[in-house]
Amino acid sequence: MASRTGLRYNEIDMQPKTHLKVDQDYRIFFLFMTAVMIGIYILSLNQNADLRQPALASLFTLLMVVHIVLHWMVIPIIQVSIRKVIYILGQGILAFVITHISRNTGMVFALYMALIGETIGFLGINRWSALSTLYYLALSLTNFVIFTNIENAAYWLLTIIPTVIFIGMYVTMYLRQAEAREKAQALADELESANRQLSEYAARVEDLSIANERQRMARELHDTLSQGLAGLILQLEAADAHLTNNRLGKARSIIGNAMQQARATLADARRAIDDLRRPVLEDMDSALRLEVSRFTEATGISCDYRSDPTQPVPDPIKETVVRAVAEALTNVANHARAQNVTVNVGMKEKNLSVTIQDDGVGFDASAIPPGHYGLLGIRERVRMVNGSFEIQNDHGTILKIQIPL
């Protein structure tokens, strides 16, 4: 039906509210209507001998063909308001003439009921479709009275009222079903579009995750490998210089130190890899105590660890704190020349507070040479959990980390 095209009209100017979307479902209605009209056409020819006269038969056939063709052309015709009015009036007159020529009361119902259903379909349920329906019913009643007499109008009324009610209910239900299908299709299109966007976002997140993982591995391994190998190169260059000058004892001593450093670097690299493969931390306090213990055993530097009771901490924050403390202790061991270190962990105004303080020589944070990424790694980790990172140099170095919980 025309209603399936998605047309809706304003009750005042009868203009389309949405663009036309031709659907193939309306053709089912027109095929059924055409079959009914062809059947009533053949029945009229058989019942009325006058219709078999060549001139009248030709006129009757021509009018029926025009009437059916106009039904099939209703979609492009009704796009303009004035043509819509002409269509309604013209089809009514055609139906009146065809019915009058046929002298078949079946035409009274077949032609006009099809027009009423079609009009409700493309106008909707409003006063314009009501006026069009009254127009068709008046023509139908006139035809019926001409065939019979005014006394039989009651029979027409008893037949036409339930038929019109049925058609109105059927078309209304069809319209609602069509609207529901169109909304469902629109929703499906939106969901498909959203799914494509989610797929794109997932690909972007995967790329970012890979980049973040590379940065994380760089943070974990930069000191272990880059600084250890840099030290080895310096020692080997010194040993080579002593060998050139035939200072074999000095060269042998440096080479021995280089071998010890190579073993220590290898051990540190293995520990870093083990840390990377270690599952999510279950207990931050235990992990921090382990890092402090490793630091003290490896360096002999006294490290005082203090921890106040804190609320449960999410896994990303646990890993950030443990990695930051481990990196800070590594920097102390390599650069600070400290005698004592203090690590404090606690709560401060709903923030997790971590402080690492040493009594070493301190350093200028703005003058860190290229290739040293320890502090950069700490900053990146803390930023990823929306925290803040601060460095102070006061009789040593103080690193302060604040992470909101």
Image (spheres, rainbow, N blue to C red):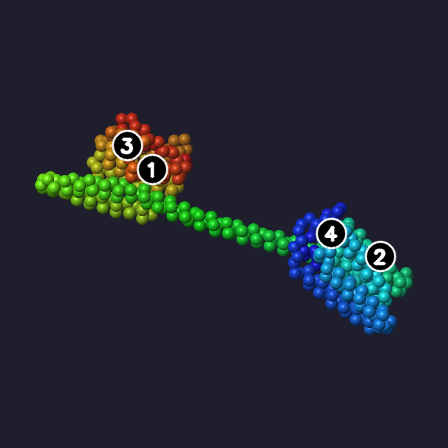
The part of the image, by quadrant, that contains residue 184 is bottom right
> Percent x, y for residue 55?
85, 70
Q: Which amino acid, mark 1? A: Leu
Circle 1 or circle 2, nearest the eye? 1
Q: CA distance from mark 1 to mark 4?
A: 70 Å
Image quarter where the C terminus lies is: top left
What residue is at 25 percent from the left and 45 percent from the top?
269
Which amino acid does the dot numbered 3 rest on? Thr
Q: Is residue 289 left or right of residue 62?
A: left
Picture quadrant where residue 293 is located: top left
Question: Which disc is residue 387 wearing?
Answer: none
Of the numbered discs 3 and 2, the one sitting upstream in the chain is 2
Which residue bears the numbered disc 3? 342
Q: Amino acid at mark 4?
A: Val
Badge 3 crowding class, 10 Å Cα cut-off, few under 14, some 14 to 19, many 20 or more, is: some
Name the residue: 29% across, 39% down: 371
Q: Position of residue 173 (x, y in %)?
A: 69, 56
Give the alpha-carbon distance from disc 3 to disc 2, as whole Å: 101 Å
